[in-house]
Image (cartoon, coloured by chain):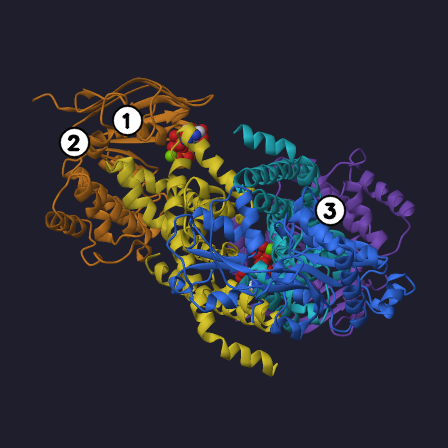
Chain colours: A yellow, B cyan, C purple, D orange, E blue
Amino acid sequence: MGEFFDIFIGSTDVFFQGLWLTLRLSVVSLLIAIVIGLFFAMLKISRIKILEIIADLYIWVVRGTPLIVQIFILYYGLASIWLIPEFWAASIGLAFHSGAYIAEIIRGSIQSIAKGQNEAARSLGMNRRLTMRRIVLPQAFRRAVPALGNQFIIGIKDSSLASFIGLQELFGVSNTMGSNSFNYLPYFFTVAIYYLVIVLVLTVAVNQLEKKLAVSD
Amino acid sequence: MGEFFDIFIGSTDVFFQGLWLTLRLSVVSLLIAIVIGLFFAMLKISRIKILEIIADLYIWVVRGTPLIVQIFILYYGLASIWLIPEFWAASIGLAFHSGAYIAEIIRGSIQSIAKGQNEAARSLGMNRRLTMRRIVLPQAFRRAVPALGNQFIIGIKDSSLASFIGLQELFGVSNTMGSNSFNYLPYFFTVAIYYLVIVLVLTVAVNQLEKKLAVSD
Amino acid sequence: MTKPREMIRVEKLNKSFGDLHVLYDIDLKVNESDVVVLIGASGSGKSTLLRCLNFLEFKDDGKIVIEGEQVEAATHDLNKVRAKVGMVFQHFNLFPHKTVLGNVIEAPIQVKGMSKKEAVKEGKRLLDKVGLGDKYDIYPSRLSGGQKQRVAIARALAMQPDIMLFDEPTSALDPELVGEVLETMKELGEEGMTMVVVTHEMGFAREVGDWVVYMNEGRIVEEGQPDHIFDHPKEERTKAFLNSIL
Amino acid sequence: MTKPREMIRVEKLNKSFGDLHVLYDIDLKVNESDVVVLIGASGSGKSTLLRCLNFLEFKDDGKIVIEGEQVEAATHDLNKVRAKVGMVFQHFNLFPHKTVLGNVIEAPIQVKGMSKKEAVKEGKRLLDKVGLGDKYDIYPSRLSGGQKQRVAIARALAMQPDIMLFDEPTSALDPELVGEVLETMKELGEEGMTMVVVTHEMGFAREVGDWVVYMNEGRIVEEGQPDHIFDHPKEERTKAFLNSIL
Amino acid sequence: AGDDTATDLNGDSTDEDFHLVESGKLTFAASGEFKPFSYMEGTDMVGYDIAVGEAIAEKLGLEPNPKKAVFSGIVTGVSEGRYDIAVASHTITEERLEQVDFTEPYYYSGPVVWVQPGSDIETEADLEGLKIAVARGTTYIAMAEEYTDDIPQLDSDVVALQSLANGNYDAVITDDVTGNAAIDNGLEIEEAFYLGVSEQGIAVRKDNPELTQAINAALEEMKASGELEALAQEWIGVDITVEPEDTIE
Ligand SMILES: Nc1ncnc2c1ncn2[C@@H]1O[C@H](COP(=O)(O)OP(=O)(O)OP(=O)(O)O)[C@@H](O)[C@H]1O
Ligand SMILES: Nc1ncnc2c1ncn2[C@@H]1O[C@H](COP(=O)(O)OP(=O)(O)OP(=O)(O)O)[C@@H](O)[C@H]1O
Ligand SMILES: [Mg+2]
Ligand SMILES: [Mg+2]
């Protein structure tokens, strides 16, 4: 126990570097994922058969294969065609993955915005684009906040897989330090605590945000 | 493309061994996870504060840390205390992880079984245990089938992480063959197809099961 | 004439949900073979009173005496008490994963330890009695509302209760199905079953009821024989209520 | 006397949803400043007709002529047509993420390209007019139903429509709030707005309506001046309907 | 070889003497991703390390039981009793000696700095601050740390070399033989310079000195009989079983 405490305290600088990388990976991938998700959500509600099929295909492939396969294809698999640095391979892999889930979240919340909102806007002479941009999306995003927050938390945990393409994010740090010292347990416990704290902080933050956004409801 | 096809065909025996291991891992871990999930679901609805807290704690820890950390703690971390063979480290790690999600699924479906069912059973003189066992759980399980099926699919994909403790399941096979041949892409595409097919088959199977169970509804 | 046996006695029963006081000082007596009808506006506490009698809710204070024995949650095995008091709910609450017969034999086998053979025999007898002799192996989802409610009655009777409680048994039914359920209840009353019935069917109350209790805002405002209550109510509130529903 | 200007003309309009034929050969004419009231039982097709006039639903065949121009979905910019025809819905459909004033100025700015300053000035004027001069910056969730509906009216008026359609504007309101909305509508009618109103408020129909149209099962069964329809209906179905709601 | 060990080799001893993980079997770990020392052919692990492990098992009268393992976990796997031994190209180091015992070296090799073709890295000084990838848990980490902080760590050397060829890193440090095998497989990388010579030993659990001794005896016999050299020739193509002139400090 004393040993664990020493290691926990003694390794903060390295773990903070890992933490910083984990956060960068998660945030960057979330932002890309939102763009991807929004794009495919639009395809899904486009009512154009071929576009819907494309979106379904994307979602099916992502949901049907492990994230690690997606990351490894981007990093190792595509290397001979297109060289992607670790950070971007991991970020894009994570984004590609979350994107499918986010597409479903956004589509769901768009469709939950009462049909009535759409009709009200259309009856005022607003065209489909304008209606989407000014009326539906702002409400859909707000409604999606809890689910998006949850997806972000999943993204943070998933970013641990970036260690397997050589990135020294939180988990990578613990794995390296554990194997170098031939003493894994304290490092894994340390990293678990880091993750738990991030997730806790984020959960609270998302709840706060939710409350704040609810003001106008 | 021809090369990919050759590799796809030529590697079936190795991939089938990986597939067999993937399926064993996923099924074993699902079964353990259902036991764990049922246990914690019972704690959560026990109305005994301390048991609820224990269940919440478990769920919080699992949801707050990456699966890979959980598996590595079991395999590397605990080795000095308790030596767990790869297969069991992976199975238990996966089960421990899914268990938290399954606990929530089961709790949710128990609570969705109308309060009325409980009251009808109690009014006939059935005690709480009997009511749970004979009336609520059979209905709850049935209602949980789609979500459990979904969790099983997630488990299959998550089992890819077992490769990082040396198990040659599907992903491990593709990774090893890719690195030995210095030619990853065809092997990763091959393994992606395996996963997609399993997931597709399972999705259809779960849907069928759902329909069959719906007969008496 | 011998003194009738007292099946239920309630004294100064009070019940709150949190801050909401729902039942105030309720006194009620039900003798053997009585059919007591509870009437009153929505929210007046009828269901709560019935549920207290079956210990699905617990009183705050007061006395509940069932067949001469004062029942307290702390000291009594409530499951035993509940087995003596059958209950029929507005929404039937059949077990959807069991057949009609399965619904009826479940409790006798599991609670009373009756043999399956005997339970099936008795169950079939009861289902025949409520007119569902051809539906043993069907699942509840395939029944009409009226049929469901009759299964629920058979299910409660299968525990051989001494008292039956009915909480608006016909109010979830389409009008054309109400009659078959009331008929079954009427037969039951004529066979001498002790019954407490919450209902808005005033025809039933008048024809089958021995005693009518009118509740308002958690209190018993007026009670008496059906003809008295319906034809010569004393209280203004009773009159107003009867006007509103007749 | 000059011939009144014709604002809406419908000829032989038919509309189905899949297999369900909802409107049969509807003919309707609405002149400038007319207040036409549509009545009829639930499901008779009143909403569908109104929605066809605003092109929220598309007719199967027949003609719809708005201000002299026959409008076809294929060849017309429907957004322009809709801007001329305001619509008020039963459930208000305010934009919950915008303030009261935000709701009113949204379309003028975005669709008409009005300057924000001008839109705000006009929006405030309209909100004052419907009696909500003190609620500009409040979110809809904090308004009563009657206030919400008056915002919805102001929002539609902000587009300066030539015609206003109302689909049961008061039927989602608590009874005590109905009056304020009807009052607003009455003023609007008196100012000369052309209006088509679906409502069950027969008092309003009689007082404000110039023409009443009774629909049944997708057909116009009878139409005429309010006094004629209400006091001397010719058709049996009209009589039955009026009896059922009066 | 002494007489004691000779008796062991003659099969007089039973496997109880060795505290084996699975009785009657010599359970040995290798990474399976260190061509040509260990790699996968179908579902079988093969290579020089595996061949040596199998030969030793045979000499000890045991059934060989190779286990594929992630390299970084192998030393602890041996010390914690997952495997009896590791024939996994472990360089004998102080740190590892704290965890496990090592046998005499079963081959000699040298860490090499590998670079992309046409790279202008020629001396140690050129490595300053560059991105140097290594396999997790290897001795190469410490070497790389001499020059830089930017050290991606991967689960295998082969993967690192592959990524180097892809252009992800400036350099990779790994074994001479492994790098050359990769080049033979068509990987476009180049040898920059040697970082010395290292001794590779077989790792054995500390509480199992009898096994260490028996393996040492077996190795001795295989060296003497030329069997070990034959294995090296078969799998590597050169004799790496004799100590070169200048061993690393
Ligand atoms: N579990 C509960 N928690 C809180 N309040 C409750 C609960 N059950 C009932 N109440 C409240 O107690 C009051 C009496 O309810 P009760 O259901 O007994 O009335 P009722 O006479 O049966 O009405 P109805 O005719 O609508 O069934 C109501 O105000 C109701 O909202
Ligand atoms: N989008 C739709 N899809 C299918 N059927 C529809 C749709 N909208 C309306 N209907 C059907 O068309 C018929 C007429 O509906 P409509 O809403 O026009 O009636 P209404 O006279 O407005 O009734 P209410 O008074 O209930 O509003 C009904 O049978 C309705 O179920
Ligand atoms: Mg009730
Ligand atoms: Mg309507």
Chain containing the residue with disc 3: C
Q: Which numbered dot is residue D33?
A: 2
Q: Quadrant of ligand 1?
A: bottom right
Are the residues at dot 3 and dot 2 in contact (C-beta closer than 8 Å)?
no
Question: Residue B58 at what x, y percent from top left?
Answer: 62, 66
User: In the structure shown, which secondary structural element does the residue marked by tag 2 occupy?
Assistant: loop
Q: Do labels 2 and 1 share a chain?
A: yes
Identify which residue, B61 or B22, lies in the foreground: B22
Q: At label 1, which amino acid type do we have?
A: His
Q: At label 2, which amino acid type do we have?
A: Ser
Q: Which numbered dot is residue E1?
A: none
Closest to the camera, between mark 2 and mark 1, is 2
Mark-to-mark CA distance, 3 and 1 = 55 Å
Query: Residue at position x 54%, y 81% from top?
Result: A6
User: In the structure shown, which secondary structural element does the residue marked by tag 1 occupy?
Assistant: helix
Residue that mark 3 sits on:
C152
Question: Residue B119 at what x, y percent from top left?
Answer: 69, 56
Whether residue A107 is visible, yes or no, is yes
Query: Residue at position x 58%, y 30% from top?
Result: B5
Whether residue C39 is visible, yes or no, is no
Residue that mark 1 sits on:
D228
